[in-house]
Amino acid sequence: MKLHDGISSRLREFVEAQPMFFVATAPSGPDGHVNVSPKGMNGTFVVLGEHRVAYLDFHGSGAETIAHLSENARITIMFCSFQGPPDIVRFHGRGRAVPVTDPEFDELLKLFPDAPDHHGARSIIDIDVQRVSDSCGYAVPLMAYEGDRDLLIRSHGRRSDDDLAEYRRRKNGYSIDGRPIFAERE
């Protein structure tokens, strides 16, 4: 493993070339569930500096990341290569969720010029990267990337803003550990 002072141009090129990444968060204390979520879609992750990254967070089956970030802000982002040289890059940091209902959301959205249709995004996860490391990915399998799925974008395209707000209240109101997410914010 090698530690880096920040996100170098080499690391930036590596992470921007990966079609998916993983997000890990956990609640404070010994109780609750650790969460790991796969993320993808070209244009939804951006490197904003040597110590700052962000990604578009779309409506989905759960919102554990948002619940955990509001509690303790701890987050790790991991990229691994499924093609080419074996490498794993991790960004450890402090994150915050900026919900679609926050006036800052529209300003941050401008940082994603290559994102697909952002209708259906529920927040932007903005991360202050405090630790950057890479290590070998010798055990990561070689797999071929066929392309992004468009199911999420198509599904959200059929919903109005009011429908998405209701979705957040109904399906993303509380984390699996009962922590409030959107239930008390909107």
Image: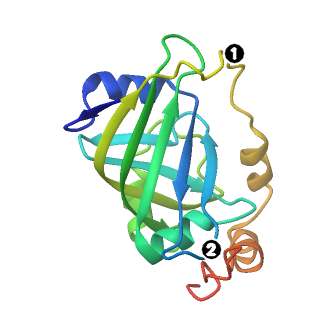
Residue pictured at 29% horizontal, 46% vertical: 131
Q: Residue furthest bottom?
A: 184
The count of marks equals: 2
Instruction: Provide the residue designation for mark 1.
Output: 144
Q: Is residue 92 above or below residue 144?
A: below
* The C terminus, quarter of image: bottom right
* Contact check, label 2 and label 1, Cβ < 8 Å: no
Residue 59 is situated, as x and y percent measured from the top left of the image, at 68, 60
Q: Position of residue 17 (x, y in %)?
A: 48, 23
As shown in the figure, which amino acid type bears the numbered disc 1? Ala
Quadrant in the picture for residue 94: bottom left
Label 2 neighbourhood size at 10 Å, few (<14), some (14-19), many (20+)? Answer: some
Q: Of residues 44 and 116, which is closer to you in this image?
A: 44
Image location (x, y in percent) of residue 154: 78, 46
The kind of secondary structure element at disc 2 is loop
Question: Considering depth in this image, is 103 or 54 the residue closer to the camera?
Answer: 54
Q: Which amino acid lies under the numbered mark 2 shown in the image of this protein?
A: Gly
Name the residue that disc number 2 marks: 32
Compared with 57, 48 (above or below) is above
